[in-house]
Image (spheres, rainbow, N blue to C red):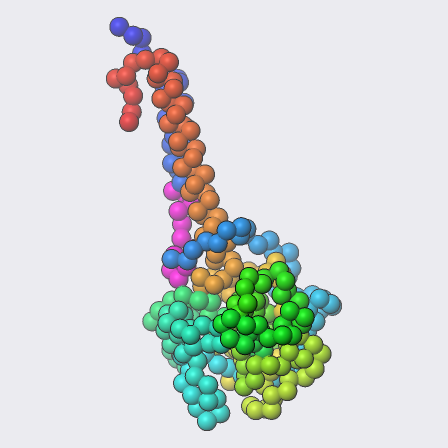
Amino acid sequence: MLAAPPRRSMVFLLMLASAAASAMAQSMSTVSTSSSAAAAPQGITVPRVNSPTMPRLGYSKYPWKTDIMATVFWVGETPTENNPTPNNKSSWDPEWEKNFGGFDDPDPLKRNNANYCPQGFTPQLNPFYIALPYNDCLDYSTHKPEASKIIPWFKQRFTRAGKTVLRGTWVAIRFGNRVCYAQWEDCGPFVTDDHEYVFGNARPKNTSNRGAGIDVSPAVRDYLGMGSSGKCDWRFVDVNEIPPGPWRSLGNNNHFVRAQIQQQSQQRSDVASRLEELKKARDAYFKQNGNSDLRVR
């Protein structure tokens, strides 16, 4: 009869397996309801935040555009006399309202004050979004001729002609003593060719709605306490400048949500690999020491 393996070795192996299983359970927490179906792209790492809530005022790479009239727009907005363009689709997404998850109702009485979202559903895209009056594409197969020259990040983001390099870009919006962060998701107000203002030093050339130069979503409006319109400052920001806040919580187009999903996926993969290593070590131990009656499969 083969001798039973030492009890201490068995206990040690069981403790290792238990620790790995515990790590797997801890890594399974979800990011948010809206991001559970989002695919994690390759090469994304969790952004490191090194800045305070108020961005650096002397930042020269992306300077502030100051004293800009802002108006409110929303996903699913129907045409009106003052705004003839419907917002069930955007300049870059023909199914914007569907992909957002529904109508982003701007009525304050129909919004959730806790997360700046409309009541009744959790948006599938970031509810903190804006529009600026420039589109880098002529259509879905062609960029505007000046786009590669005037967009600072064009070369880094370009993948093919007609695919925008602007969508999803982050901006900071300052109103009074508050700063909000949002993603560029549509073009306007009213014009889509004002690169002298968006990327240069000119004032907005639009003359409608008191010369509005930026559209902000209801979530941005509510966070800033802006009302239906008001003058603000804004500038582009890099992802690593964006501090914690509600703008980092939702949306499968959100860099932070996607990074968390990838991180959790990597954690699950690491735990699974470790469990497999433990299983092989266990099997090798029993193969060497015998006593198949004590094997746990």
* In the image, residue 161 above or below residue 20: below
- Give the residue displayed 51% in from the left and 75% down from the top: 139
In which quadrant will I find the N terminus?
top left
Q: Position of residue 103 (x, y in %)?
A: 38, 76
Q: Position of residue 176 (x, y in %)?
A: 62, 77
Q: Residue furthest top?
A: 1
* In the image, residue 149 above or below residue 155: below
- Left or right: residue 20 versus residue 181 is left
Q: Nearer the viewer, residue 271 or 169?
A: 169
- Give the residue displayed 70% in from the left and 82% down from the top: 202
- Give the residue displayed 40% in from the left and 65% down from the top: 124
The quadrant where residue 180 appears? bottom right
- Give the residue displayed 57% in from the left and 81% down from the top: 192
**Residue 54: in sight, yes or no?**
no
Q: Position of residue 14 (x, y in %)?
A: 37, 26
Is residue 51 within the magenta segment? no
**Residue 91: in sight, yes or no?**
yes
Q: Nearer the viewer, residue 73 or 43?
A: 43
In which quadrant will I find the C terminus?
top left
Q: How many marks overall? A: 0
Q: Residue furthest bottom?
A: 81
Q: Nearer the viewer, residue 97 or 176?
A: 97
The quadrant where residue 230 appears? bottom right
* In the image, residue 49 above or below residue 13: below
- Left or right: residue 285 versus residue 138 is left
Q: Position of residue 205 (x, y in %)?
A: 64, 87
What are the residue bounds of the magenta stretch?
25-36
Is residue 30 within the magenta segment? yes
